[in-house]
Amino acid sequence: MSIEEQLIENAKNGKVLTHKCTDCGHLHLSTVYYCLKCGSKGFEDVLLEGTGTIATYTIITVAPAGFEKYTPYAFVVINLDNSELRISGFMAGIATPADLPVGTKVKISDFDERGIIVEKQ
Ligand SMILES: [Zn+2]
């Protein structure tokens, strides 16, 4: 399975596949190919729960062609629980900032043509 396929598979199960540096222990998203801290290329897979809190987001009211059916939705950045990693995804039904205060607890729920799908916990 490619990294992309693994990412999709794990997102559908509410998980995030990460790469932990076998030299210094620094945790990365699985799309990184060498350690950002020490340059090592040795990684082991670590599966994290796809839960966290909203760090920031952008509400999308004018969607790219083909994505109009999803509006309004938000492109969100999540601080993952139990790690310093951030991951980005998409959240349905977000029309105004009142719908999604920063710090809202969310979880990864699926993966579709937009990418990782997130919902409120
Ligand atoms: Zn390292």
Image (tube, rainbow, N blue to C red):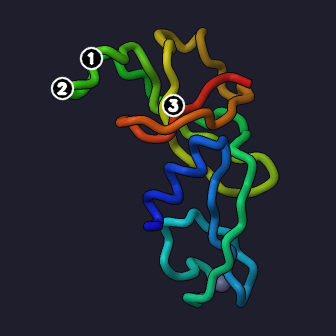
Q: Position of residue 40 (x, y in %)?
A: 58, 90
Residue toward you, 98 or 115: 115
Q: Which mark is residue 96?
A: none
Image point 49% across, 38% down: which residue?
111
Sooner in the amino-acid sequence: mark 3 or mark 1: 3
Q: Which residue is mark 3?
A: 57
- How far separated are the C-alphas under marks 2 and 3? 21 Å
- How far separated are the C-alphas under marks 1 and 2? 7 Å
Q: Quadrant of the C terminus?
A: top right
Quarter where residue 46 is shown = bottom right
Crowding near pointer 3: few (<14 within 10 Å), some, many (20+)? some
The secondary element bearing badge 1 is classed as helix
Crowding near pointer 1: few (<14 within 10 Å), some, many (20+)? few
User: Farthest residue in the right direction?
Assistant: 82
Kind of residue at disc 2 = Ala
Q: Does the CB distance between marks 1 and 2 fall below 8 Å? A: yes
- Using residue 29 as the reference point, say whether residue 107 is left or right of it: right
- How far separated are the C-alphas under marks 3 and 1? 18 Å
Q: Position of residue 35 (x, y in %)?
A: 58, 81
Q: Position of residue 14 (x, y in %)?
A: 66, 41
- Using residue 72 as the reference point, say whether residue 27 is left or right of it: right
Kind of residue at disc 1 = Glu
Q: Position of residue 83 (x, y in %)?
A: 76, 56
Q: Which residue is mark 2?
A: 65
Q: Does the CB distance between marks 2 and 3 fall below 8 Å? A: no
* Quadrant of the picture in which ligand 1 is shown: bottom right
Image point 38% across, 35% down: which residue?
114
Image point 52% across, 25% down: which residue?
91
Q: Which residue is mark 1?
A: 68
Sooner in the amino-acid sequence: mark 2 or mark 3: 3
Quarter where residue 103 is shown = top right
* Mark 3 or 1: the one toward you: 1
